Image: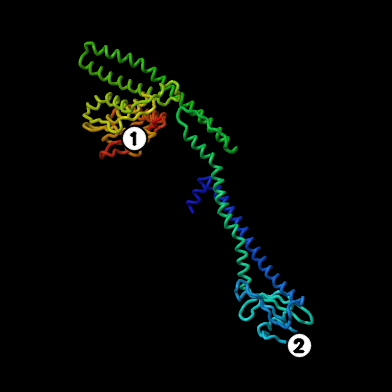
Amino acid sequence: MESLKKRLSDSAQFRLSFVLCMAVVGIALLCGVLGFLSAWDEAHELQDSSLQQIASLAKDDLLAPRNSNFVSPPLQDEEASRIIVHFIFPVAQGMEPASQDAFSSLASLPAGFYTTRINRHVYRVLIEELHDGLRVAVAQRASVRQSVALSSALRTLVPFCILFPVLLYLVADLVRKIFRPIRKLADAVDAQRDGLSMALSSEFIPREVTPFITAINQLLQRSAESVERQRRFVADAAHELRSPLTALMLQAERLDASDLSTESRARLMQLRAGMKRTSTLVEQLLSLSRAQSGEVGNLPPVESIAVFTVVKQVVSDLLPLAEQKSIDIGVVGNSEASIIARPSELYTLLRNIVHNAIQYTPLAGKVDITINHSAASLFIDIEDNGPGIAVDKRERVFDAFYRIEGSDISGSGLGLSIVSAIVTRMKGQVKLTAATSSATGLKVSIALPLN
């Protein structure tokens, strides 16, 4: 009951379907009961009419009074279904039939319909006046009448039994079709991506929902404008920071060539390391801005890329970092797969993931890159034996600037944000799971469409 109440309160579609189905059930039951009672009464009236017709035969002298007990042919070969015709003679004539004991109770009754017990059975009896005090009693066993009436009344319920489930199905299907545009609208809202201010169409949508669509479109427009302003700010800030940072790094290099004391040179090295980290952050901000940008016209065109070639370039560029930590990095799988994409995006995507894997893998660890493909998709898995990421934080790490607490690895927290933005632009999927080849570690699975 609690589950039903919860579904009724949570789902307007279920609530509407439930109310309509209950209405159909109520109306169907009411119509069925009324139809059953009407057919029941009509069947009894029809049988009473049969008794009246037989009595009219006696009135027209078509039944001879000398045959005081006339038994009609049985219905459906059932002896109990026979109709009995009994003539009641005036007492003065002294003509008492053999069955006087059985029908003696009818002699004192006036004309009309009666339900009485005769010979241990209940009968429906019609008594009619004939002439000269002669009367006729036409009787039929009540159980036979009930059986005939019940059979007739039940046949009237057959259309209800057929139409009832059909009506329930039609109601449920109609409600589902009414709410189908709402579900499509929800899918369209869910398909919205950052940087895409696509307006929702109100075509085929009920008028009652149109104001809601208008409000959603306005919200999407404001949200897109806000995101675009944020991106422009990040891109402009990164561009503005790049030039002074470059100048500072040049000055630091010149200063390094000067004759400095040991203490000054140590501080200079710290300064250069800080400027290098800042420069890396600026470059990642620019990469994130480009990855999230909705202006496809500013991006290089797509082309057919040999995936193994890009992977080999990424491994070659990051090999010095892996050698510093004695990390075994290797590539396995299908080396002939090609994908239609922008080379710079695929390179940035793979480089960020492999770079993170190398950074978080301990000394003498390993990083494996697996390439596979199907008829329509490319699959790349990067697996390491590092500390891994807790299940409840695997979605959070895709947020910009989010870093796992307690990590002593330097970084900006933008790498996986860039990966997520590029995968979204390429209409692919990225998933983080636990490593399968070692007790600890992380496995990054990427699925991209080949075309």
Relative vertical location of residue 231 with respect to residue 386 in this rendering, above or below: above
User: Which comes before the other along the chain, label 1 or label 2?
Assistant: 2
Instruction: Give how far apart the Cα atoms at labels 1 and 2 are.
Output: 112 Å
Label 2: state its secondary structure. Answer: helix
- Residue lying at 32% horizontally and 22% vertically, measured from the top left: 280
User: Which residue is at 57% across, 49% downward?
Assistant: 171
Inspect the image, locate mark 2, and give the three-letter code of the amino acid beneath it: Gln
Left or right? Give the position of 426 relative to 176.
Answer: left
Closest to the observer: 426 or 71?
71
Q: Position of residue 219 (x, y in %)?
A: 52, 31
Eyeballing the image, is 274 above or below 335?
A: above
**Outermost residue toward the left?**
262
Q: Which residue is mark 2?
A: 93
Q: Residue at x 32, y 26 (%)?
A: 310
- Camera-side residue of 365 and 141: 141
Residue 40 x, y percent position in the rendering: 64, 65
Q: Indicate the position of residue 377 as horizontal and vertical percent values.
A: 38, 34
Which of the 4 image quarters holds residue 414?
top left
Residue position for label 1: 445
Q: Label 1 is placed on what type of residue?
A: Ser
| Pair 1/2: label in front | 2
Q: How many marks?
A: 2
The numbered mark at residue 413 is none
Of residue 198 and residue 48, the one placed in the foreground of this image is 48
